[in-house]
Amino acid sequence: MTQSRVAPASGEARTQVGIVGAGPAGLVLAKLLSRAGVDAVVLESRSRAYVEQRVRAGVLEAPTVELLREAGVADRLDREGMPHQGISLRFAEDTAAPQTDHRIDFADLVGRGIVVYGQQEVVKDLIADRVDGSGGGGALEFEVSDVAVHDIATDAPSITYTAADGSPRTLRCDVVAGCDGFHGVCRDAFPEGTRRIAERIYPFGWLGVLARAAPTQDELVYSNHDRGFALYSMRSPEVTRLYLQVPADCNAGDWSPARIWDELDTRLACEGFTMNTGEFLEEPSVTGMRSMVAEPMRHRRLFLAGDAAHIVPPTGAKGMNLAIADVRVLAEALASFFSSGSETGLDEYSPTCLRRVWRAEHFSWWMTSMMHRFDDSDPNGDAFGRALQLSQLRYTATSRAAATSLAENYVGLRHGSV
Ligand code: APR
Ligand code: PHB
């Protein structure tokens, strides 16, 4: 358990925590460990430019913002992030009626809000803090390949990989943190029969566009339209982020900019609502939607965190927040393990995280069920399902108790309260 630095020139190095993946989970974990005096090395398969530009969701729940502030990596977030005190649900009472907005007022209902700040901005801030040394620095290697984890059932696991310069490396550590996302290798390093996967795949995806267009609304709009779901979001005073529900097998290339703007216009229509259009800042792309939980999140000295362990559909904006909530628990457990040798926190890691994970899974599934069209393939439509959806929307929009439940989940349950 001695603390040491990776020696980049040699083939073998040692650290306390070997972290696979430099997404929000791996980078926040590295930052929290560094503040606790625990040595870590982060290994990332992509380049720095790639991970800094990868566009993902952009909603930070209140506990995430608090954690980033406490960790000392929120200066730019506090300057450039857009605090929001609510969202709107947009829907028509019946097909003949026009769509109207029903605002869920977070500040009034739960006294807290969210901050809109792109995931890749969080990633950029954390990488700058680690690599450029403003936060004390730490090892972070990009463009590694052939990552494999070994001996996770022993007290001396290791990670083998090929460094960016093509040389083979071995990183010996006390603990491996699998923060390598949904497509990573760590989840599958669990021995046969030691974990189970619960999964649901939805028959639709989201076509996402990022446009150079000033937002015309101050807050996000979730619209349940007869033609399918649409989301109006933003990234800055100059950039709008928009999504359309599309069939899961849809080809983004079939959607011309004109068709996308037309469809957004139709699905987001509401009295008084206008939308600025503008050039797309990246190619529109389709993201599939699934819910997945791998349990437990630990096998001996291997700990999974973030998308490596669980996936939520993006409707509740929970992906990055859940990843950061996991590593908050993991960092505390590891700090206590390395300072006192106590394994209590390590033993509680998986059950503690899974309580929050399942709450977020439920919320994301519920938002998804309430907002999307499910009956595309049925020419008669699913009249019962549609009526239930409308009833749930009306109830959420008009009952303070129902709206409070949405608000409490959306802004994020307090650390340790689930
Ligand atoms: N070796 C090293 N790195 C890997 C490997 C591997 N074999 N496989 C994947 N990675 C890297 C990916 O390139 C990525 O940068 O692991 C990182 C995982 O990051 P994310 O996918 O962002 O996952 P996570 O950190 O759990 O964040 C979860 O935040 O990024 C948002 O919306 C996203 O919901 C997601 C959430
Ligand atoms: C986004 O701005 O990208 C975003 C916002 C809310 C969501 C999902 C994505 O639920």
Image (cartoon, rainbow, N blue to C red):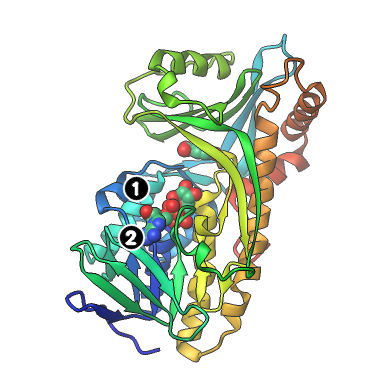
* Pointer 2 residue: 44
Amino acid, disc 2 = Glu
Horizontal placement of 198 versus 20: left or right? right
Residue farthest toward the top in the current orientation of the protein: 96
Q: What SS does tag 1 mark?
A: helix
Amino acid, disc 1 = Arg
* Pointer 1 residue: 79
278 lies above or below 181: above
Instruction: For ligand 1, give the image quadrant.
Output: bottom left
Closest to the observer, 299 or 394? 299
Residue farthest toward the front in the current orientation of the protein: 192
Q: What SS does tag 2 mark?
A: loop
Q: Is there a contact, CB below 8 Å, between mark 1 and mark 2?
A: no
Q: Position of residue 114 (x, y in %)?
A: 52, 46
Quadrant where the N terminus lies? bottom left
Closest to the observer, 209 or 275? 209
Quadrant where the C terminus lies? bottom right
173 lies above or below 78: below
Callout 1: CB less than 8 Å from ligand 2? no
